[in-house]
Amino acid sequence: MRAREGLQLLFSGQHEYVFSYGPSLSYLKVVLSTVALNLFSTHGLEPVRLATHVAEWALLMGQVCGTVRPSGDLVPSSCYEYCRRQAVTHSGVSPR
């Protein structure tokens, strides 16, 4: 699933980001761990952009509502790879 009009950030606080998409009344809440924030800060990814990529990944995996919590097991996961690729694509830096 992909949000045709993109994800809209409804609100955020601390390390929590709530997104809606399209005309849906459903929402996705992304809770970022300190580990995830630190890991992706080395890629130059700001927290709100990371949360957006995690929400996109969740939609692609079929999760259309609820809470997504990427944590310590984020590193070997497809979520990590998706977010890393998006960071590289949006920064214009070639992948290693």
Image (cartoon, rainbow, N blue to C red):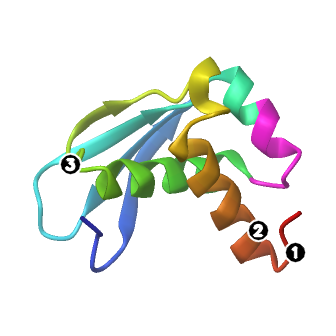
* Residue 31, x across and y down, in percent: 48, 29
Helix, strand or loop for disc 1: loop
Tell which tag, 3 or 1, sits nearer the viewer: 1
* Residue 18, x across and y down, in percent: 37, 43
Pick the front one: 59 or 33: 59
State how far apart marks 3 and 2 are (Cα): 25 Å
Amino acid type, mark 3: Val
Q: Along the horizontal axis of the image, is 45 left or right of 86?
A: right
State how far apart marks 3 and 1 are (Cα): 31 Å
Q: Tell me, yes or no, whether the two marked residues, 3 and 1, touch with CB atoms within 8 Å.
A: no
Pick the front one: 94 or 55: 94
Helix, strand or loop for disc 2: helix
Amino acid type, mark 2: Val
Helix, strand or loop for disc 3: loop
Amino acid type, mark 1: Val
> Residue at position x 35%, y 51% from top?
19
* Residue 51, x across and y down, in percent: 54, 47
Mark positioned earlier in the residue sequence (1 or 2): 2
- Mark 2 — residue? 88
Which region is colored magenta?
38-45
State how far apart marks 1 and 2 are (Cα): 5 Å
Q: Quadrant of the N terminus?
A: bottom left
- Mark 1 — residue? 93
- Mark 3 — residue? 64
The numbered dot on residue 44 is none
